[in-house]
Amino acid sequence: MTATELKDKLQSIRQTLSFEETAEWLTVNVDSAEFHDFALELRDQAELDFDFLFCVTCVDWKTQLSMVYHLRSLDRKHSIVVKCKLDREKPEIQTVSDLWHTAEFHEREAYDLFGVKFTGHPDLRRLFLTDDWVGWPLRKDYDDPVNMIKL
Amino acid sequence: MDVKDKPTLPKPFPGQVHETPGGGILVSKLDDVIKWARSNSLWPLVFGTSCCAIEMMSTASAKYDWSRFGFEVARATPRQADVIIIAGTIVNKMGPVLKRLYDQMPDPKYVIAMGACATSGGPFFYNTYSVVKGADHIIPVDVYVAGCPPRPEALLHALISLQEKIRNT
């Protein structure tokens, strides 16, 4: 399905979405409270059939955090990007590891580096850093006087 | 070469040749001969952490072959290695591992810091919480190679400089 067809289909499912079409794939902005149900529909609807979550990232815009999910359909051969805004003081979102198991490790990485809590995650703990590390290194306001040399 | 020409030793071999009717006598210092032998047979340890390892692999393979210079056998075990080429970024987690490998190498051992990351932290010098700013914080380095990544010819130049360092000191 092309980007316009996807956009029409998604708008028929949920009216409260906003889209961006400037990038390579269609980008959908969703509210973080509705994200899990929307993701379930993306995976289960026959024409959408997004069965491959290939990237989970977090971005730190200084006023807020946002989660970015890249989904692909292997049979229908279309891709989509889903973005959710998160509050900086309390970044929480429901996990999608029950829909796509690859999200278990991707969400652990986002927790490790940004401090985003994924509610319902079976095993949320640090992935790359040591378990006793304090702080969320990839946030813009992270400060480490021992290791970092500031430019 | 004509059959009538006298055979001459390759220039870099240390010592003086005195011609006698039966052949020749070579006079040299044992130190010089040992250094010559060591420098021409430095076996590297397989140690590549990041992108410089790709350039190191390409130096080792057919186009820029480093076994022409004696680096023939690259073993994965430090017990049989003479030189460790630190090709890549050293992060805080890798620091103790590098120290342990260096300690396991038998003397005489040499270290080449290849690339910007092993020299000084490279592009990760500023604003990184996890990179060791130069491998010489952990082990003593003999030769530094600049580049990100250094070309295979630059690595070969570093290897030849290490050979000259061994022969001259």
Image (cartoon, coloured by chain):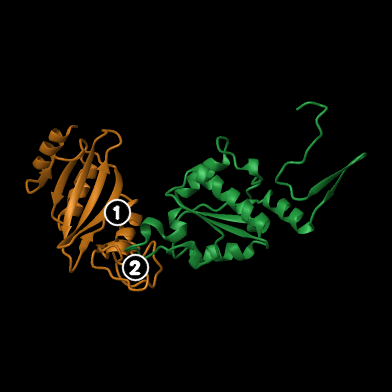
| Quadrant of residue A49 within the rendered picture | top left
Q: Up-down: is B54 above or below B112? A: above
Work out which residue is located at the far left of the displayed protein and give it: A15
| Quadrant of residue A81 within the rendered picture | top left
Chain B drawing hue? green
Pointer 1 residue:
A98
Read off the chain for label 2: A
Which of the two discs, 1 and 2, sits closer to the camera? Answer: 2
Work out which residue is located at the far top of the displayed protein and give it: B2
Read off the chain for label 1: A
* B80 or B122: nearer the viewer: B122
Q: Which mark is residue A148?
A: 2
Position of residue B53 measured from the top left corner of the image (x, y, whole percent): 50, 48
Labels 1 and 2 positioned on one and the same chain: yes
Q: Residues within 10 Å of mark 1 (few under 14, many from 20)?
A: some
Chain A drawing hue? orange
Q: At x 47% / y 43%, what residue is drawn?
A: B151
Position of residue A75 measured from the top left corner of the image (x, y, whole percent): 29, 33
B7 relative position to A65: left or right: right
* B126 or A144: nearer the viewer: B126
Question: Nearer the N terminus, badge 1 or badge 2?
Answer: 1
Q: At x 21% / y 63%, what residue is drawn?
A: A92
